[in-house]
Image: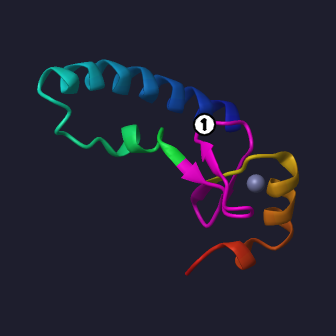
Amino acid sequence: MKKIILATILIGAAIIALKSNANTIVGRTITNPIDSAKKVIIDPVCKMKIKANTSKTTVYNKITYNFCSESCKQKFLAEPAKYVKK
Ligand SMILES: [Zn+2]
C-alpha cells in the first residue's frame, strides 16, 4: 500500500516538474498545491524547518506529517494529539 502511494507521489512529482517549467515561462504566477508541498515545512514535534518528501513521515487523520528524525516521529506517534493543532 505504501509503495503504491509513493509511486503515485513520484509520478505526480514528475508531472509537476514538467508543469512548473511551463509556469516559469509565464513568471511562476500559478500556485500549484502539490508544488507548495515540496517547500520547507515545519516538524510538528521540534518545530525545526525541514524539507518535505523525506522518509520520516507518518499519516494521522489523513494528513501527512514530516519529521526531521526518527525520534521526532516516534514522539509524535506516542502522542499525536499533543502535536496536532485542531
Ligand atoms: Zn524534529
Which residue does the image show at 38% across and 37% down from the upper left? 35
Describe the element under mark 1 as helix, strand or loop: loop
Which residue does the image show at 61% across and 67% down from the upper left? 61
The residue wearing badge 1 is 53
Whereabouts is ligand 1, in terms of quadrant? Answer: bottom right
- Whether residue 84 is visible to the viewer of this picture, yes or no, is yes
**Image quarter of the N terminus:** top right
Q: Can you tell which quarter of the image residue 73 is in?
A: bottom right
Q: Quick check: is 46 in the magenta stretch?
A: yes
Whether residue 71 is situated above or below residue 29 in the rendered picture: below
Whether residue 25 is situated above or below residue 4 in the rendered picture: above
Q: Quick check: is 47 in the magenta stretch?
A: yes
Label 1 Cα crowd, 10 Å radius (few <14 / some 14-19 / many 20+): some
**Image quarter of the C terminus:** bottom right
Instruction: Give percent across and percent down for residue 77.
Output: 81, 63
Instruction: Give percent across and percent down for residue 29.
Output: 16, 39
Q: Can you tell which quarter of the image residue 6 is in?
A: top right
Left or right? Give the position of 37 relative to 52: left
Left or right? Give the position of 82 relative to 75: left
Instruction: Give percent across and percent down for residue 48.
Output: 67, 54
22 or 51: which is nearer to us? 51
Question: What are the residue bounds of the magenta stretch?
Answer: 41-64
The single residue placed furthest to the front in the displayed view is 48
43 or 58: which is nearer to us? 43
Whether residue 44 is situated above or below residue 10 in the rendered picture: below
Whether residue 17 is situated above or below residue 32 in the rendered picture: above
